[in-house]
Image (tube, rainbow, N blue to C red):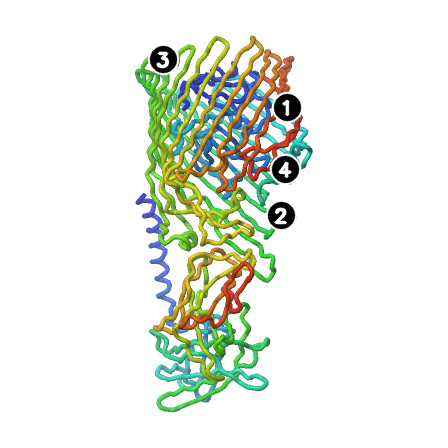
């Protein structure tokens, strides 16, 4: 039995020791490795680079990395403070969206990060602009640039009015790469205080009932309701996926008093909840 | 349990047409053997088989203890003592081989054909553990033995036709035997359209087509050593399963082995046989021929096995030892892809067998102690190490949806013990046996993921934390002869602990559209299975004989519920007329009403039935060789019936005229 494992381990060890050598020779340390450039915004002496994994903004949760380059020295600024304001221009009004603050990415010198949840877009991706305010060495700068936000193929965000009259925005964050397993599900829940302010909603519960409409509304066992985690202000629960394909994640939002604000139970008569997110893999 | 003596006797007496055996079973047809002799042309002269071109399934069904579960007209699943595949060990000449279908549509008996085999050895309960661990028993499909008798070139041709289903079968057999070298090749081709049940009702999706070719060659180095190589290729296409929602577009097997024989003379060691083998199976289930389905799906499966055994026979004083050291490594993978009815949605995919690796190694020791001229005490032990591993991480993760702890590996140590006392006198035989056995759960029982069982209409999910299933067994048989009348009784009782069966999981939603729910494999604390058969025969004259069998079976769990697939009261009677050149047999075959059915597991009360068959045979000799003609009518009265073992009660064949013609050229 032992020998059976020994040989493969030896080979693997050999293989990896070789590949590490290669890395050492070629690596120039790149802090945005693995990220794709979305857009650059030039503002006087600075160029702001926006990155994420896909290289484009899509509706829903977008984790965004930023760098500010000093165009004269061609170096990246390491001690800026930043904030942002996304804005959707509608025919009669404009509104913003849920977002985080921007902070220095952990363990990196030049990269800042934060998230924006675009709750909607126009079919051609137009309508959104992004204002970036930043401070370098005590000097404030500001720039506004048009961005394009594409419609994500599935419903990864839900905007709705609860029975309490409040407008909420719910966005799927995890699983990003689902598998046939119990996946950790992570969502962000925000309320629309006004057109510009979207604070996090705390201590609600989101009941979860994943279904496959294509398979006779098959569901999976051992899912758990999502609950609020005050360490990072998101909601977490267990999402079981028994096969690949299209899943409708039926949800029911309850406030701290367990009053149902939105969504219904899925039954034989009621195929789906009015509050749901979608997942495909 | 076949000893070397039996094997040698089989060979020696094959020209006489039947093998002497110590045993106890009465087959339904005229042979009285536990070993169902799957003919070969060499043994045709005995008229033993009703049809020279019967399938293995037909042959197996002749044994009392064997019943074939039918999901269609092809690839029947053998059961012994009312126990199905997972409680049996089915091998091909000692080679482990595992079906690749998660729905048991390809029992391994479907991957060989009669032309490949010399005989079938059936061991009931712990007497069947020579090749592996089992609860219900073992079936070993024996390949022909090597021979170096210099008989030269031989050939044979078989043609068969049956009216019901427009069934055609052709077999060709070529053989050259020298003194140091032999080579033989055979091929068989079968094709059937849909058959008709009684009353001319066409059973849709009961067609099949298959062919099987095999090549065997051997070389004799010296008087004591020889080697042979055997390759079997079997391919079935377009196999319909009327009782299931899906058919099979391909079931393909390649079975290869290399065997070394050492037969020293004048030593305690009588023979040493070592075999290396591998086999690979591809099984593709699809529903392209079904016009209406809830959702289209593909369910391919693969099973590869590599193994060896080394078997020694020793004779010392009154002891006859059999030692068998064996090991195998199996890889079972099956997946399911469902094509969404909504073209915007992606295909759905899951692993139904997430690449399960089984590694087994074990040793079997048997001693036949002939302590007096009439008495034998046969004792055997098998010890084995069994390891299961889930090779795909996604397999572990998918089972973790249901179970808190899923180890990717599972080790088991398995024990089988059996002891039988046999008394043989001229006019009576008696045998009493006790046994204890353990088995590991099958791949489906341990790791299956949403396997739909159309029998009870539930999806089944495996349980990686199952305990070994264990059985205590007692068996008894007795046979008394009074001049021309013979009567025998045989009986087995199994007390099975941790009896593995599916239990409804109310909190899990079925995957299959229209299924009743999900069952998860779990174990009953214990279950009891009992069977008894009374066999009798009466020789009216030199040419006329009557024989008959009645059987009773019982199976219940500790919860008092009936177990599924327990045979109801059954009976069989036959009138024979035999001369060297002609034989005729009229058979009556029937079952009583299945009143002790298991509604929990999807059974309903299957009505009683009885059918009549007439089988006739002639032999002609001429200058070129010999011609054997077999013909007859099955289900003469065109009864519409189904048995307890017919999946979802789909009806069996109605009236069928058949004719088989065999040419043997020496």
Distance between mark 1 and mark 2 Cα atoms: 34 Å
Which residue lies at the image location 35% right of the left edge and 89% below the top edge? A137
Residue B238 seen from this side? yes
Q: Earlier in the sequence, mark 2 or mark 4?
A: 4
Q: Position of residue B334 (x, y in %)?
A: 49, 47
Relative to A28, residue B147 above or below? above
Distance between mark 4 and mark 3 Cα atoms: 51 Å
Whether discs 1 and 2 lie on one chain: the answer is yes
**Tag 1: Cα neighbours inside 10 Å, few (<14), some, or many (≥20)?**
many
Question: Which is closer to the viewer, label 2 or label 3?
Answer: 3
Relative to B618, residue B172 above or below? below
Which residue was labeled with disc 2?
B288
- The residue lying toward the viewer, choosing from B533 and A237, is B533
Distance between mark 2 and mark 4 Cα atoms: 14 Å
Question: Which is closer to the viewer, label 4 or label 3?
Answer: 3
Distance between mark 2 and mark 3 Cα atoms: 61 Å
Which residue was labeled with disc 3?
B374
Pointer 4 indicates a residue of which chain? B
Pointer 3 indicates a residue of which chain? B
Secondary element under disc 2, as helix, strand or loop, is loop
Which residue was labeled with disc 1?
B660
What is the quadrant of the N terminus of chain A in the image?
Answer: top left
Which residue lies at the image location 65% right of the left edge and 36% below the top edge? B194
Determine the image quadrant of residue B341.
bottom right
Which residue was labeled with disc 4?
B207
Q: Earlier in the sequence, mark 1 or mark 2?
A: 2
**Tag 4: Cα neighbours inside 10 Å, few (<14), some, or many (≥20)?**
many
- The residue lying toward the viewer, choosing from B378 and B357, is B378
Secondary element under disc 1, as helix, strand or loop, is strand
């Amino acid at each position: 039995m032992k020998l059976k494992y020994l040989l493969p381990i030896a080979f693997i060890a050999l293989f990896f020791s070789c590949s590490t050598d290669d890395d050492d020779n070629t690596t120039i340390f790149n802090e945005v490795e693995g990220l794709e450039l979305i857009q650059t915004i030039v503002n006087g002496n600075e160029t702001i680079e926006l990155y994420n994994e896909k290289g484009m903004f899509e509706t829903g949760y977008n984790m965004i990395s930023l760098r500010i380059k000093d165009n004269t020295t061609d170096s990246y600024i390491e001690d800026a403070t930043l904030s942002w304001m996304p804005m959707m221009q509608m025919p009669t009004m404009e509104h913003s969206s849920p977002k985080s603050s921007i902070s220095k990415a952990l363990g990196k010198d030049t990269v800042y990060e934060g998230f924006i949840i675009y709750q909607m877009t126009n079919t051609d991706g137009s309508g959104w602009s992004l204002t970036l305010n930043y401070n370098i060495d005590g000097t404030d700068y500001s720039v506004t640039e048009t961005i394009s936000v594409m419609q994500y193929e599935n419903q990864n965000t839900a905007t709705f009015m609860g029975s309490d009259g409040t407008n909420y925005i719910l966005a799927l964050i995890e699983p990003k790469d689902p598998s046939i397993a119990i996946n950790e599900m992570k969502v962000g829940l925000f309320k629309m205080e006004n057109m510009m302010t979207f604070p996090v909603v705390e201590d609600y519960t989101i009941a979860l009932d994943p279904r496959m409409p294509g398979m006779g509304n098959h569901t999976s066992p051992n899912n758990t309701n999502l609950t609020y985690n005050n360490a990072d202000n998101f909601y977490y629960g267990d999402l079981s996926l028994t096969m690949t394909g299209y899943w409708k994640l039926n949800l029911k939002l309850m406030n701290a008093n367990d009053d149902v604000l939105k969504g219904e139970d899925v039954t034989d008569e009621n195929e789906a909840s009015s509050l749901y997110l979608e997942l495909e893999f | 349990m076949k000893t070397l003596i039996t094997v040698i006797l089989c060979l020696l007496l094959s020209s006489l047409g039947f093998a002497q055996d110590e045993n106890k079973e009465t087959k339904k047809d005229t042979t009285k053997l536990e070993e169902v002799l799957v003919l070969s042309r060499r043994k045709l002269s005995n008229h033993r088989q009703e049809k020279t071109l019967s399938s293995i399934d037909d042959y197996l069904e002749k044994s009392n203890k064997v019943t074939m579960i039918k999901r269609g007209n092809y690839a029947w699943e053998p059961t012994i003592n009312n126990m199905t595949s997972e409680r049996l060990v089915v091998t091909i000449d000692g080679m482990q081989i595992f079906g690749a279908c998660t729905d048991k549509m390809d029992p391994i008996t479907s991957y060989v054909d009669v032309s490949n085999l010399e005989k079938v050895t059936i061991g009931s309960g712990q007497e069947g553990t020579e090749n592996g661990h089992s609860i219900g028993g073992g079936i070993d499909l024996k390949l022909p033995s090597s021979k170096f008798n210099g008989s030269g070139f031989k050939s044979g041709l078989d043609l068969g036709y049956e009216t019901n289903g427009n069934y055609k079968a052709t077999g060709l057999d070529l053989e050259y035997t020298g003194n140091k070298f032999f080579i033989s090749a055979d091929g068989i081709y079968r094709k059937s359209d849909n058959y008709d049940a009684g009353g001319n009702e066409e059973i849709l999706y009961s067609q099949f087509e298959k062919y099987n070719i095999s090549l065997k060659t051997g070389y004799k180095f010296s008087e004591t050593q020889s080697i042979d190589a055997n390759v079997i290729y079997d391919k079935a296409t377009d196999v319909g399963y009327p009782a299931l929602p899906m058919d099979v577009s391909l079931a393909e097997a390649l079975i290869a082995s290399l065997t070394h024989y050492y037969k020293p003379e004048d030593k305690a060691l009588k023979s040493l046989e070592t075999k290396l083998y591998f086999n690979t199976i591809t099984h593709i289930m699809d529903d392209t021929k079904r016009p209406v389905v809830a959702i289209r799906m593909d369910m391919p499966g693969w099973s590869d096995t590599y193994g060896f055994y080394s078997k020694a026979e020793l004779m010392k004083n009154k002891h006859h030892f059999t030692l068998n050291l064996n090991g195998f490594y199996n890889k079972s993978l099956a997946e399911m892809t469902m094509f969404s009815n909504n073209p915007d949605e992606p295909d759905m995919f899951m692993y139904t067998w997430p690449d399960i690796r089984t590694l087994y190694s074990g040793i079997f020791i048997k001693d036949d102690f002939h302590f007096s001229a009439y008495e034998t005490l046969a004792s055997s032990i098998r010890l084995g190490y069994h390891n299961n591993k889930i090779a795909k991480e996604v397999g572990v993760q998918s089972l973790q949806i249901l179970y808190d702890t899923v180890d990717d590996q599972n080790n088991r140590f398995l024990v089988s013990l059996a002891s039988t006392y046999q008394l043989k006198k001229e006019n009576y035989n008696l045998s009493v046996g006790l046994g204890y056995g353990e088995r590991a759960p099958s791949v489906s029982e341990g790791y299956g993921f949403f396997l739909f069982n159309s029998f009870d209409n539930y999806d089944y999910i495996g349980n990686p934390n199952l305990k070994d299933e264990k059985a205590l067994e007692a068996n008894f048989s007795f046979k008394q002869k009074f001049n021309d009348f013979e009567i025998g009784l045989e009986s087995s009782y199994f007390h099975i602990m941790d009896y593995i069966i599916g239990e409804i999981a109310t909190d899990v939603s079925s995957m299959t559209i229209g299924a009743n729910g999900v069952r998860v494999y779990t174990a009953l604390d214990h279950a009891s299975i009992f069977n008894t058969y009374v066999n009798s025969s009466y020789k009216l004259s030199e040419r006329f004989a009557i024989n008959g069998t009645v059987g009773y079976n019982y199976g219940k769990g500790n919860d008092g519920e009936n177990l599924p697939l327990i045979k109801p009261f059954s009976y069989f009677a036959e009138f024979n007329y035999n001369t060297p050149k002609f034989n005729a047999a009229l058979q009556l075959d029937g079952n009583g009403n299945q009143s002790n059915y298991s509604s929990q597991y999807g059974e309903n009360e299957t009505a009683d039935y009885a059918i009549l068959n007439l089988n006739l045979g002639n032999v002609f000799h001429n200058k070129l060789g010999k011609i054997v003609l077999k013909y007859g009518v099955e289900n003469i009265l065109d009864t519409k019936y189904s048995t307890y073992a017919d999946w979802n009660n789909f009806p069996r064949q109605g009236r069928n005229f058949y004719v088989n013609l065999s040419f043997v050229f020496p």
